[in-house]
Structure formats: C-alpha cells, structure tokens
Image (cartoon, helix red, strand yellow):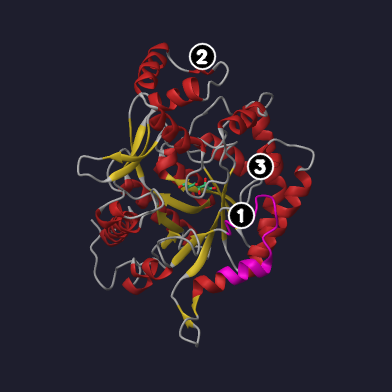
Amino acid sequence: MLELSIFNYPFSINKRMSLEQTWRWYGPSDPVTLQDIRQAGATGIVTALHEIPNGEVWSYEAIKERKHLIEWDDSQGKPRKRGLTWSVIESIPVHEDIKQARPNRDKLIENYKQSIRNAGKAGIPVLCYNFMPVVDWTRTNLYFELEDGAHALSFDMVDFIVFDVFILRRPNAEGSFPKEFVEKAKQRFESMNREKRYELEKTIIAGLPGAEESYSLEQFQARLDEYKNIDSDKYREHLAYFLKEIAPVAEESGVKLAIHPDDPPYSLFGLPRVVSSEADFQYLCEVYDSVYNGFTLCTGSLGVRADNDLPGIVERLGDKLNFAHLRSTQRNADGSFHEAGHLRGDVDMYKVILSILKEQKKREAHYRTDLNIPMRADHGHTILDDLKKKTNPGYSAIGLLRGMAELRGLELGIERGGDVYN
Ligand code: DNO
C-alpha cells in the first residue's frame, strides 16, 4: 500500500486538481440566484442565452454582457467579482433544418460557427449541445414521489405508451411495443381523467427546462412525419456533416465541443437516436479527431442502458471528455427508470469519479492544461422547502446542493485515498 507522508504524497494538498464544480443557471429568471449558487460552493456557471431564437447568431456583445452579469456584481456601485465564471454554454441549440439536412442547413451552420467564434472570443471554453431529433430530454413524471416524500423525475414506459399509442395516436406506434405493455397502457389510459391525460401530454411534449421546443399534439406529429425518410444511418451522416463543419471552427476558436448523449438513450417515437452508446461516441469522435470535438459524460442518460460501461468509456475515450453531468438512475427491466440520489441507483459513482480523476492524471502527463474538467451535479430531487416553491423540475437549489455536496465529498475522499495512483 502506498504510504502517504508529506514527502511521498504525489502532489501537495494545495495543488489538488479538483474537478471544476459548476451549476446550471437558467438566466436572470431562474429562481436560483447567482448568490445562491456561490453559497452552494460552485465556481463555474453553465448557462445559455435562452432568449435568442434557435438558428440565430449569438453575438459577441450579448455573450459578453451575460458573462459580465455572471462574473461581476455591479449592485454596490463599484463592480465586485462574484467568484463565478461562465465555464460552459449549455446549449446552443441545433436547428431542426440542420438535423434534417434541409436546403438552408448551410446557412444555419454558418450561424452556428459564428456563435462558436463569438463564444471563443468571449473566453467561454466549453460548449455542450445535443443532436436529439424533435425532443430533447424526456420524462413522463416530474413529481415521482419517493418513500421519503421527495420528488424525483421519472420515465415510466407504460405511461409513455399511453401517450404514444392512445393520446398522440402515432400511426403504427402499437407495433413498437410488446403486446402486454400496450394492453396495460390501454387500461391505464381508460382509467385516467382528462386532466391526467393532459398532464402527461404536457410533461412529454411541452418542453422541460432547457428544452428548445414545445409543441401541440398536431405540431408534434407533423414534426415526426418529417423524419419518415431519415433512418439512423442517414441521421448519423447529418451529424457527421455538421461536425466536420463546426469542429475545425471550435478548434480555431478555443471552444471544446461536448455533445450530450440521448436521454433516454434509445429511440422514442420511431425517431433515430445516434448518441446513445460508447460505439456512438467513438464514431463521432473519429469524424473529426481532436480534443475540441468531444462529449459530455452524462452518467444519468448513458446509465439507463446497462450495456454502457461508464468508467470504461472514460478510460477509453477520456481525452475527449469535456464536461461531466453526474447523476444516477434506478432502472427497471422494461426501460422505465427514475432518478436516484447521486450516490445511489445503478451508477457506480465511486468508479465514475475515480476514472475521471485518472483521466486528469493522464492529461497532466501529456502537459494538457485542461485538468479541471467541469462537472455539475445534474437533476437533484425536490426536497425540504423547495417542495413548497415553484422550481425548475430537477434544478431546485436544495436537491442540487445535496447532490453536489455528496459528489465533492466523494471526489475528495477518492483523491486523498490514493486510489487514483493504483
Ligand atoms: C437536461 C439536460 C439536457 C441538456 C441538453 C444538452 O437536464 O441535460 O437538456 O442540456 O440535452 O443540449
């Protein structure tokens, strides 16, 4: 066993290379304030200019202005540093016309590139984005009650089928699911009143926090129809086309791309999903081989598939790990899941953090300077006082604070324990 003393400790305590603790902030209208975030102990802010319509350029001035708001407190006359940095953009949305390779995609890609250049000029080092068609992250219940009274986000396959087959009535949807599930869903649908049905519909298609679009039933079906002739292979080509265009610009601009995996990591509504597994990550990293073309390790999204080996992904592809969303899910055999506590559920968070800390060591050995990989506690439970407040589901302050505190404690324990050197 490695004996730790002041003389052989591999690096001094002060030089601890911790991960950068970040927090997602939804902008000035977020009920969680910048001061709250500072008090929670985060130093990095993850945010977006949500007010800019999808497809338009994020101007340098608009980015600079938001960055100033995040980093400087002007309320006392003389600007004071808040102790926060805008570390990650999450997300600049990718327009559906790019995803579907429509005729004006090149124009929209030019806009995207310009936004990346402007972000780079403003000094924002990481850009998280996703390439999920039509819907971003998807849940069926935002208030799933745990045995202690806390609320978690959940995805219930039978509820999902209720929506897909009986509310949306997507043509041929029935064939996508096992018969006995459809039967269960039928019974559940019949037992639900109008409000319950509408609630489910809203949860699935009216847009969760940070989602780019919100639809009515008709608009939604029309969007799905646009994908009739786009299968996974074709969709993957659309992603590769986009990446080959933007990754060199990201590299020149000093902005690291971090694609977010599909959430959940399987096809919904018959749509193609191509960022769900290690093989998918591997493919897109090879499309343009550069550390500027990397990914977000979202342990909660990837972890819903038992065949995703999370520490293995970091071990094999870690040089492209540009951002980490740390959370855990508890899955059922039928594809349903709910979001568990950050150190509970199916994700082995000890092994995940250990693998990220080992990746830091590799980077140090390669003289890379991006050692403090940004991470954020993702999707907390709604607990304590927040149960009485209006909050962004998954993003209420106290639950995230609990998650982040657990994660930072675990990280410190792993670092001090010395396993990183084994
Ligand atoms: C949900 C988030 C996603 C994520 C986007 C990235 O909580 O993880 O909305 O921000 O998919 O583009």
State the residue lying farthest toward the bottom. 78
Magenta span dominant secondary structure:
loop
In this view, the mark in front (2 or 1): 2
Q: Which is more N-terminal, label 1 or label 2?
A: 2
Q: Measure the alpha-carbon separation of dots 3 and 2.
A: 34 Å
Q: Which residue is mark 3?
A: 287
Q: Residues within 10 Å of mark 3 (few under 14, many from 20)?
A: some
State if disc 2 and disc 3 touch (CB < 8 Å).
Answer: no
Q: Residues within 10 Å of mark 2 (few under 14, many from 20)?
A: few
Q: Measure the alpha-carbon separation of dots 2 and 1.
A: 41 Å
User: Under 8 Å from ligand 1: the CB of mark 3?
Assistant: no
Q: Secondary structure at mark 3?
A: helix
What is the magenta range?
A: 49-66
Residue 268 within the segment the image draws in magenta: no
User: Under 8 Å from ligand 1: the CB of mark 1?
Assistant: no
Query: Which amino acid, mark 2?
Result: Gly
Which quadrant is home to the N terminus? bottom left
Q: Tell me the quarter of the picture where residue 5 sits.
A: bottom left
Q: Secondary structure at mark 2?
A: helix
Answer with left or right where residue 331 lies relative to residue 265.
Answer: left
Q: Which residue is mark 1?
A: 292
Residue 53 within the segment the image draws in magenta: yes
Residue 72 coordinates in the image, percent (x, y)? 50, 77
